[in-house]
Amino acid sequence: MMPKLRWLTIPAFSFLGFVTFTSSAGAQSFVEFAAGSSVHPGVNGAGASYGHSLTGRASFGQPVRPGLSIRLDADFTQFDNTVQFYPPCAPPGCTHPSYYTQSTFLAGLSVNALANLDSKGVFYVVGGGGLGVGGDDVDTGLQLRMSGGVGVAIPAGRLRIVAEARCLGLIGATPNGSWLIPLTVGIRY
């Protein structure tokens, strides 16, 4: 499973790195790198519960007017499905439940509007859409995605410490497995 995620995200992060280092130093553009975890609501259709997630995001933003920016995000979430199964057991039967873990991911590129809620740009809302892939070894189709959320960007010298919570989903995916809530903390410069 990891090779699929690696081959999808490395080009996206490389592109954002290239844009970061080739943009002019005096421009008002910004770059963010953040990592965290995700919350997945409920249980998927196969009876699996999700946990042990890792979420990462690299973003490039450009102000279009005071208080409003456009941001390109490359993000991924890698998480595990823990599924209970019932192996054949010799008499008197199984003494404990058996589980197997299947790795699943969601990754994509999206364009978002970022609107400040205050004059200093500390509190903001973010929302947009793009393309993403998600699944396990069987299902890796390309689908439309949308997201929306809130964030805080606290000034720390030339940097900002960023904390963000978004609701991220694939349009047309199954109702039980289509939404994630990435919670990330990172830096903006």
Image: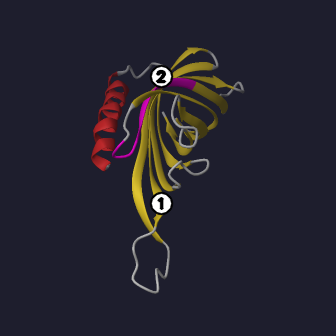
83 is higher (above) or lower (below) than 70: below
The span shown in magenta is 128-138
Residue 185 visible in this rendered orientation of the protein: yes
Helix, strand or loop at label 1? It is: strand
In this view, the residue farthest toward the right is 118
Q: Is residue 111 left or right of residue 25?
A: right
* Cα distance between the residues tagged 2 and 1: 41 Å
Mark 2 or 1 closer to N-term? 2
What number is the disc on residue 82?
Answer: 1
The amino acid on which the numbered mark 2 sits, given as a three-letter code, is Ser
The amino acid on which the numbered mark 1 sits, given as a three-letter code, is Thr
What number is the disc on residue 29?
Answer: 2
Q: Is residue 152 left or right of residue 99?
A: right
In this view, the residue farthest toward the top is 65
Residue 68 image position (x, y, % from top left): 61, 18
Q: Main secondary structure of the magenta part?
A: strand
Residue 154 visible in this rendered orientation of the protein: no
CA neighbours of label 2 inside 10 A, class few (<14), some (14 to 19), many (20+): some
Identity of the residue drawn at 66% across and 25% down: 116
User: Is 12 colored magenta in this rendering?
Assistant: no
Query: In this figure, what is the number of numbered marks?
Result: 2
